[in-house]
Amino acid sequence: MTFTRLYIHGAGRRGTAAWPAADHALGEFLSFEPGSMIPEQVEWLVRSCSKQRTVLFAHSIGAVPAVLAAASGDLGIAGLVLVEPALYDIARGEAVVERHISSVTEARAQADAGNLRGFWAIMRPLMFGGPFDADVWEAERPVAEHWADTNVPWGHGIRDHMLAGIPTLVVTGGWNEEYEMIARILTENGARQVVLEGAASSPTGSPRLCPGSRGVRAHPPFAPVTVHNFGAQRRHAASRRRHAVRRPGDPKLCTAGPDSAGGSSPVPDALAHHGRHAVLAH
């Protein structure tokens, strides 16, 4: 069966830069327009993928338009591979999810009031594990501006039953309670889960995620999905490493990395692969 692999980035790096371990010759790597809203992204996916069988690989907040587009019935969808999907709508009411949403809402209120520094004082520890440092504030200001302007991954009307009948694989790193909670809900509704142990900061960078490598083989026919020795399929982060937020290798940040268009990503290297969402990340 002929199909297309389409890779959808999170809120940080775009295009091929968001999927460093994937074989860039085997798929199409999407770069949504900066500042585009979720409905625009869904419309683009439906318009672009409606005439071909497609496996959607989506990371973090990229899972939001991917799921909405797949659930619309307007795609020739062969399957979904959701890597640490930020599908917070399906886990509302869970304490760990509500705690995160509350913190982000408080931070965004600071940004909306014109207090970008106050926004970053909340978001920097929350997303990247390192404390706010006034000495490097000016260097980090562009990153704070980027995160203050990203879409939030809740409030989009996603429900846990939307993927019924769509072969779905959920990949997590086993390090973040929110992602594991979302994955558990998805598996209860028919998805399969793989935990890539040792890929805590960014499963998108794990060679075990690459099609054709040993590990997750994400190709139609999508069932059964083949999994090789990646640990238990339904494992809660709470039972292993609670709140194990990875810290940047250099809290004072590196220079911005290239995006797929050859420009500069607004998320510096030191943050791009260590953010919690980077899911709103990586």
Image (cartoon, rainbow, N blue to C red):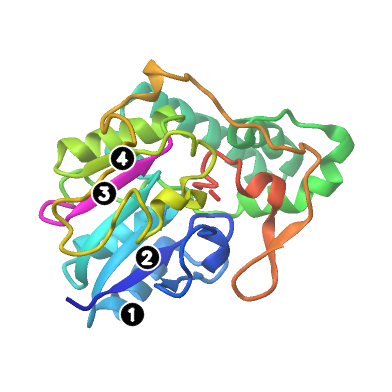
Residue to which mark 2 is pinned: 39
Of the pair 8 and 47, the residue shown nearer to us: 8
Q: In this view, does 93 lie above or below 194?
A: above
Q: Is mark 3 on a helix, strand or loop?
A: strand
Q: Would you say residue 172 sits in the magenta stretch?
A: yes
Distance between mark 1 and mark 3 Cα atoms: 22 Å
Q: Outermost residue toward the right?
A: 135
Whether pointer 4 and pointer 2 mark residues with C-beta atoms closer than 8 Å, the reply is no
Residue 55: percent from left, percent from top: 28, 66
Residue 9 against residue 186 in the figure, above or below: below
Q: Name the residue under label 3.
A: 169
Q: Which of marks 2 and 3 is nearer the N terminus?
A: 2
Say which residue label 4 marks.
Answer: 194
Whether residue 267 is visible to the viewer of this picture, yes or no, is yes
Secondary structure under tag 1 reads helix
Depth check, mark 2 against mark 1: the one in front is: 1
Which stretch appears magenta?
Answer: 163-173
Nearest to the eye among marks 1 and 4: give it. 4
- The image shows residue 247 at horizontal and vertical percentages of 66, 32
The residue nearer to you, when weighing 16 against 164, is: 16
Question: Looking at the image, can residue 92 be seen?
Answer: no
Report which residue position mark 1 lands on.
48
Q: Contact (CB < 8 A) between labels 4 and 3?
A: yes
